Amino acid sequence: MPIDRPPSTLRRLGAAAAMGLTVATALLAATGVAAAAPPPSSSQVSNSDLAPACPGPSPTGFCTELVGGGAATVVDDQRPGGGRGYLRLTTRGPADRATVFAQRFAGMRLADITDLAYDTFVERTAVGNDQAAPAISIPIRSSRVRAPGGFTTLVWEPRNSGVRVAPFQWQRWTPSTSGGWSANGMGVLNRFGFGRYTAEGVMKEKGYDDHAIAHAREVADAAGQVMASHFASGYEQLADVKERFAKEPWLHSIEGEFTGQLLAEDEADLRRTGAPRYDNLNILWRYDAVAAIRAPDIPQLWVLAGDDREAPNAITRQRLMDLKHQGKRIDLYVFPHTDHGMYEFVQDADGTRHVTRITDGYFRLLADWIRRQDHPPYGAGQRAQ
C-alpha cells in the first residue's frame, strides 16, 4: 500500500474552515456562521494558539487564513450544556472566508488515523445553502494520485453523509465510519471511503431508476458546460436544473469529479473564484478522444475495470467496440468486479469499498500482449469481441 502523507503546511482554498477533532486536520465550513466543538482528548487549544497568518510553520501548530470579513476565534464557553469551548467561524458575506489549519499533524499517515469525529452548531444558515456546515480537508501525497507531485485533497462534507444538517443544535459527525468523502485525482477507496463518484454510478448503486438517472445526467451535463467553458458561461443551464430538480432526493447524491461541488455553491462564488479552485490543471475539457484513438495505425490494448466508480466506462467500451468493428486493431479486455486501478474489492452494505488486491491475470495479460502472445485465461478477464 502506498504511504499517504499530508504536506508540511495544510492548505485548502475555497470554503471557510474550523478545527477541533479527535485527530485534528483542517476543517472546512461554507458561508454562514458555524462552530466546531473541542475534542475530548488532553489536547487543548486557546485563542492565542491561532497564528494570524500561515506564511510558514506556526510555532503552535495552528494558523488561520482570513479573507474579507471572515473571522476565527476560540471561545471559552462555560454555559450549562455549552461544553468547555469551541471554535467559532464567522463568514457573514459570500466573499468572506475563515480557514484554520492544523499544521501539527503534518506527516501523519492516513493508515494511522483510527477515529475521526467532530461536532458542529450552525448558528446561521448560509443564504441559498441550508446544508453548509464545517467539513474536513486533508491534503495528502500518494503514489496513487496522478496529479503533479502526487498531491490531492481529501474532503469530507456533512451534506454528502446522508444526514441533513440541522441548524441551531449540536450535531456529531463521524467521517471515519461514514461515506461522504471525495477527492481530486484519487481512484482508490480506503477505510474512510475516500474516492470520487460519478452521478450515474452513485445513483445506480442507490437503486434509482433510469428516469432519475436521465435527469441526473442533465445536471451533470449542465455542470460540465460551466467547467468546459472555464467558468465563462453555462450558468443559466446550471441554475435551471438546480431549480427543476431541487426537491428530488437524488440531487444531493451527485458527487462526481466536480458536479457536486458546483451544485453546492452560489453562482456569484463560481463566477468569481470557480476557475482558480476547480479548473487549474489546464485540462482540455472538449478534447476529441475518439479522433485521437482512430488516428494511429497501430495495435492498441485497452483493459477496463468492470465496476469502475471513478471512471465508469460503458461509453468508452461502446466507442472502442465501434472502432474495432470499423477495422481498428483494438484488443479490449474487461475484468469484472474490479474498481479503478484494476483493484478487486469487498463492499459493505452502505456501498463503502475496501481494496483487496490488483486483479489476478492483469499483469500477465499486459506482458503477453507486449510479446504478441495469447495464453488465456487471464483471471476473470473477458475479451470483448
Image: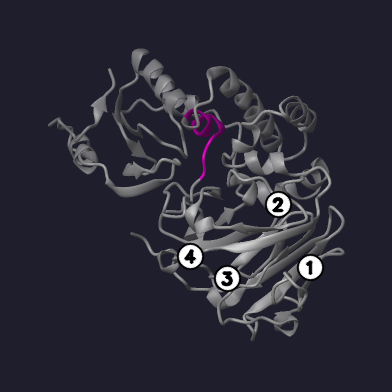
Q: Residues within 10 Å of mark 1 (few under 14, many from 20)?
A: some
Q: Cβ–Cβ below 8 Å for labels 4 and 2?
A: no
Q: Secondary structure at mark 3?
A: loop
Q: Residues within 10 Å of mark 3 (few under 14, many from 20)?
A: many
Q: What residue lies at 51% left-to-right and 67% top-to-bottom?
A: 6
Res. 365 visible in picture = yes
Q: Secondary structure at mark 1?
A: strand
Q: Residue furthest top?
A: 326
Q: What residue lies at 72% left-to-right and 75% top-to-bottom?
A: 85
Identify the image quadrant of the N terminus. Answer: bottom left
Q: Which residue is mark 2?
A: 276
Q: Cβ–Cβ below 8 Å for labels 1 and 2?
A: no
Q: Residue furthest front?
A: 80
The amino acid pointed to by label 1 is Leu
Mark number for residue 66?
1
Q: Residues within 10 Å of mark 2 (few under 14, many from 20)?
A: some
Magenta region: 196-204
Compared across the picture, whether 265 is left or right of 322 comes to right
The part of the image, by quadrant, that contains residue 216 is top right
Of mark 4 and mark 2, the one earlier in the sequence is 4
Q: Cβ–Cβ below 8 Å for labels 3 and 2?
A: no
Q: Which residue is mark 4?
A: 115
Q: CA distance from mark 3 to mark 4?
A: 10 Å
Q: CA distance from mark 3 to mark 2?
A: 27 Å
